[in-house]
Image (tube, rainbow, N blue to C red):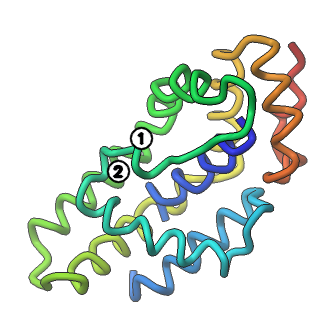
Amino acid sequence: MVKLLATALIVSSVCLATVSSQANRAKVCQKAVNLGVTFYTAKELEPILQCIEPTLYNTPEDTDTLISINGCTDLMALIDKLTKPFMNQCKQVINKGLKVLNNCKANNKKTGVAKQNACINKVYGQCMAMVTKAFINKVCTALSKKMTAKEWNCCKQYAPKVVNVTPYKCYQIEK
């Protein structure tokens, strides 16, 4: 769950964030760090985000390709268990991002990578403000309710290794 929370931050940032794609990519990465990601700096996140942008642009619904995690005992089962609740919690951001992306794809006259960069940049620009510490806390709290005590305590054990948990009240939930 540690990496799930961190990935949630990143994926939420990806589904979020209007000038240059590189400028907004940098802002999204910095926001992920500001929201608590500790295992990468914003500068280190930029090439990762850039790497997944073609998948995000071409098949934004393919979350299996976007999220690749391992670590905790039975983590894959936990991810399977939490994927739908996570997607439900993030639905507003995801839907906004998809609407912006599809509209841009249909109306942007650029081609190739220039069109991809312009459209992804619009997604970042339109959705970044939606992903806040309060939003992350809401998602975390909802996911905690879907976990057993064992699963939650595992998450709480590993989360501080990759995410600054201090700003999130959900980390204080006891089971």
Secondary element at tag 1: helix
The circle drawn on residue 92 is 1
**Side of 107 where 92 appears, left or right:** right
Q: Pointer 2: residues within 10 angstroms few (<14), some, or many (20+)? A: some
**Side of 17 where 114 appears, left or right:** left
The circle drawn on residue 96 is 2
Residue sitting at x 33%, y 45%: 62
Marks 2 and 1, how far apart at CA: 6 Å
Q: How many labels does the image show?
A: 2
On screen, residue 13 above or below 43? above
Q: Position of residue 49 (x, y in %)?
A: 50, 69
Q: Position of residue 83 (x, y in %)?
A: 49, 29
Specify the quadrant that holds the C terminus: top right
Which quadrant of the view contains residue 13?
bottom right
Question: Does the residue at mark 2 contact the one at mark 1 (Cβ under 8 Å)?
Answer: yes
Secondary element at tag 2: helix
Specify the quadrant that holds the N terminus: top right
**Side of 31 where 117 appears, left or right:** left
Residue sitting at x 69%, y 33%: 140
Toward the viewer: 83 or 76?
Answer: 76
Toward the viewer: 112 or 33?
Answer: 112
Which quadrant of the view contains residue 88?
top left
Residue sitting at x 44%, y 52%: 66
Q: Position of residue 85 (x, y in %)?
A: 51, 24
Query: Of the residues shown, which amino acid type is indicated by label 2?
Result: Lys
Residue sitting at x 67%, y 23%: 74
